[in-house]
Image (cartoon, helix red, strand yellow):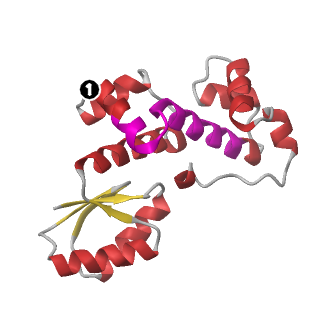
């Protein structure tokens, strides 16, 4: 049986969800971002209990097909930007359509309808948050960050950063007290 869980956006989320499922005595096969595969089925009582436990931790069981599709898109984008350094061999639309085996126009319309922003806007928000993270670490130059996140140029990164944050990357870097956003709040 597969369960789909909203707001699983990092490896710590996977550990917390796995722990909660194991506390309930469930036998897990895999735990991935937004998706858990387990042996057997859940009784309605156990499903309700699991839903309550997850809710306390900021997670939510997803039942509708549309919500599952959106969550898979979000998790794929988050994984791509934050954990694979945006190493994509094709454009985002082809990547998502192939991953989900669905028409990109349908995916784009569904995402915009439910989330209130386009897939591209969500993708850019994730990339800018990753840029902020890398700037705060102060280990890479801005040119190296632009290259790592597949920006066509340093100028493109700088323009997009300023458009989203209102600050230049250099000004942001000087503001050490600037708080970053949690990726699940973007």
Q: Going 28% across and 46% down the picture, which residue do you hit? A: 66
Q: Going 61% across and 17% down the picture, which residue do you hit? A: 152
Quarter of the image where the N terminus is located: bottom left
How crowded pointer 1 is (Cα within 10 Å; few <14, some 14-19, many 20+) is rated as few
- Please identify the quarter of the rendering in which residue 143 is found: top right
Q: Magenta span has 123?
A: yes
Q: Is residue 113 above or below residue 37?
A: above
Whole-percent x, y for residue 30 in the image:
27, 60
Farthest left residue?
40
Q: Is residue 6 above or below residue 55?
A: above
Q: Magenta span has 164?
A: no
Viewer-closest of 104 and 87 = 104
Which residue is tagged 1? 103
Left or right of 10? Residue 134 is right
Left or right of 100? Residue 76 is right
- Please identify the quarter of the rendering in which residue 79 is found: top left
Q: Going 42% across and 22% down the picture, which residue do you hit? A: 89
Q: Is residue 68 above or below residue 77?
A: below
Q: Going 84% across and 34% down the picture, which residue do you hit? A: 170
Left or right of 63? Residue 183 is right
Element on which disc 1 rests: loop
Whole-percent x, y for residue 123 in the image:
51, 35
Whole-percent x, y for residue 56 in the image:
45, 76
User: What's drawn in magenta, residue-wise?
Assistant: 110-134
Viewer-closest of 73 and 83 = 73
Q: Is residue 131 above or below residue 148?
A: below
């Amino acid at each position: 049986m597969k369960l789909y869980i909203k707001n699983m956006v990092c490896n710590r989320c996977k550990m917390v969800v796995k722990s909660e499922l194991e506390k309930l005595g469930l036998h897990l096969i895999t735990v991935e971002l937004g998706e858990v595969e387990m042996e057997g089925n859940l009784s309605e009582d156990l499903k309700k209990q699991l839903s309550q436990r997850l809710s306390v931790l900021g997670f939510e069981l997803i039942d509708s097909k549309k919500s599952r599709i959106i969550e898979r898109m979000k998790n794929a984008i988050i994984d791509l930007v934050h954990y694979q350094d945006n190493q994509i061999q094709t454009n985002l639309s082809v990547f998502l359509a192939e991953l989900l085996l669905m028409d990109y126009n349908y995916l784009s319309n569904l995402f915009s309808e439910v989330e209130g922003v386009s897939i591209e806007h969500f993708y850019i928000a994730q990339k800018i948050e990753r840029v902020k993270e890398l700037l705060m670490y102060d280990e890479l130059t801005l040119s190296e960050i632009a290259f790592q996140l597949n920006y066509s140029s340093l100028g493109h990164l700088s323009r997009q950063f300023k458009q989203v944050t209102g600050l230049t990357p250099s000004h942001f870097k000087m503001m050490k007290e600037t708080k970053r956003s949690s990726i699940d709040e973007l």
